[in-house]
Image (cartoon, rainbow, N blue to C red):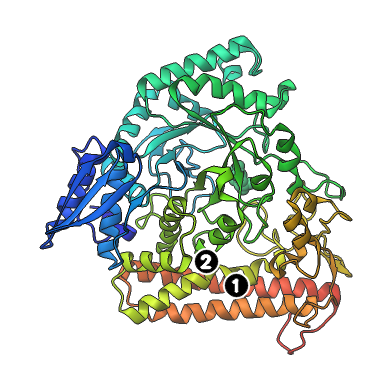
Amino acid sequence: MSDWVNRRSWLKDLPWPASENAVSPLDTAEYELKAFFAARTDTAACQLVPDLKEGYELTKTQNGFLVRGGKTGVLYGAYALIRALSSFSPVPEGVQQPYYPLRMLDCWDNMDGTVERGYAGRSLWFEGGSFSYEPARIRQLGRMLSSVGINVLCLNNVNVHQPAQRLLDDLLEDTARFAALLRPFGVRLMVSVDFSQPLQQGLGTADPLDEEVQRWWADTAKRVWDRIPDLAGFLVKADSEHRPGPNTYGRTHAQGANMLARAIAPYGGFLVWRAFVYNCMQDWRDTKTDRPRAAYDLYKPLDGAFDGNVILQVKHGPYDFQVREPLSPLLLGMNSTALALEVQLAQEYTGQQIDLYAMPPMWREVFSQMGKERVRAVAAVSNLGRDGCWTGHPFAAVNLFAYGLFAWNPDSDPAAVIRQWARLSYALPKEQETRLSDMLLRSRSVYEKYTATLGLCWMITPNTHYGPNPYGYEFQAWGTYIRADRNAVGIDRTAQGTGYTDQYPSALRDLYASLDTCPDGLLLFFHRLPYDYRMRDGRTLIQRIYDDHFEGCAQAEEMANALSGLSLPAPDREEALKRMERQIKNAREWRDVVNTFFYRYTGVPDAHGRTIYP
Ligand code: GCU
């Protein structure tokens, strides 16, 4: 069988295959426990307790364990037990319930088999315009997701290209078959839809207030839910980056979203509406328009206007998944609207599954600031593809694993989650396991130093988003500027500047607006400063920029040394080493390009005499 069977990340030690005959999560739970305990002297049984819903309780019995859980909870309980026993971690005590009811994986898969921003090969289920997959691999996918509590898979790109509309039309039977494969793992499908679909079907309009349009969506919903009764809902990217939306008809986003929400409400469907809306045709000469303001400016006035089954899906930062951004003020500002937090496992801006970048420390920051009760769902852009190891870089699997655990419990400890992943994935000697875990734990800060220090994001190669180009986006229409000149760099987003900080509750507004308290990591995101500005530690701004680039690159080189001493299984070791070589090359390029860029503006040499290419 293909490579992926032997390289199924943290499920490596689970017997294969997951049952082909299972129809419900309970069946799967029984099968998994039987297979796992076959090699042990103790036993486990499961018991359905419908009231526990997605929750479970694990108890010790005379000769093993009892897993009590609701319809899907019983399976989560089985996996939690297996995870704990295989990683020699304590078995969780008491009733465990997920924090967020919807824990989504958004896949940007196109029906031609490509994956937008995909770094792990082609789509796992689309090829040549329709479905094409190995059922066994899709079951394994269901198992991977379910084993960390992910319960919704949105199967097609938010940028809905024409053929994807067939998923709910002449390919509906195939969509239903695909849904059935994932059902025994408690994973429900969601579908991205195109707002202008009725127009494309010849109705002459997609105006949400048009009765025929409303009827068209209601009929579509009926047809779809008749076939897939547990479909989780629709995901919509509207009026964003040239996608169609209600603005075309002079309607608000609440009118657009509610129209769709009403069509699917009878079936319990959720309408997930993305808040990633900004002016992507900005004139770079315009210094008044400030892209990070856009979502709050648009949606805050609509707070309270959305129907109960609408969920507004907000990216964690106000830009677009950069290495470091402040929390989106929208996540703190909507009091009467259900929200979903969106993160990106696909490493579009964070090393593209070549450079190491483990996300748990970042999520800890996000969840701890978020005021978690306002947010009802979490969604992550998938990092999966048809590659043997599923995630391009074998270590990138840590991000999917950790996402599931954080979505279940946002108070999770990043170090513990990373270590558990390392232990489940590789049976390394203790000292090596520590080295791998530490490397992953530090990887984001290393990457940040050489690519986006002090909140200076967007110095990337346009379109591909890998590799340095400090002015790559400076004269473009995307609203992504660093505004460096020979005197200063950064953007003033305080009340004296673009006023973005005023979108935050007062404590955060004051924190960011004051140079005394603004965290270094976001300094140039919030402020425009001269190069001789004195940082709190006494260094000048320009020296700090140089230092971070030298340091980040040196730390990447240290990681390469640490990696070469790990006794990983051969294919993962080879892959990781090969990618590390590219990371080092990338880090050196970043160091030299960015340092030279600022040296040419300032003429200030490095205080320590290190090489900067003039
Ligand atoms: C980014 C990304 C696009 C994607 C968009 C989105 O801009 O580069 O490929 O479509 O985000 O989240 O919709």
Viewer-proximal residue, 33 or 427?
33
At 34% from the left edge and 45% from the top edge, which residue is drawn?
55
Spatial CA distance of label 1 from label 2 is: 9 Å
The label shown at residue 390 is none
At 75% from the left edge and 81% from the top edge, which residue is drawn?
537
* Up-down relation of residue 544 to residue 368 (above or below): below
Please provide percent x and percent y for residue 538: 78, 83
Q: What element carries label 2?
A: loop
Could you tell me which quadrant the C terminus lies in? bottom right
The residue beneath circle 2 is: 355
Q: Which of marks 1 and 2 is nearer the N terminus?
A: 2
Residue 33 appears left or right of 285: left
Q: Is mark 1 on a helix, strand or loop?
A: helix
The label shown at residue 587 is 1
Q: How many other residues sit within 10 Å of disc 2, few (<14), some (14-19) or many (≥20)? A: many
Please, what is the three-letter code of the amino acid marked with disc 1? Answer: Ala
Please provide percent x and percent y for residue 594: 72, 71
Residue 298 in which image quadrant: top right
Would you say the residues marked 1 and 2 are in contact, meaning their CB atoms lie under 8 Å apart?
A: yes
**The furthest residue to the bottom:** 609
* Up-down relation of residue 572 to residue 62 (above or below): below
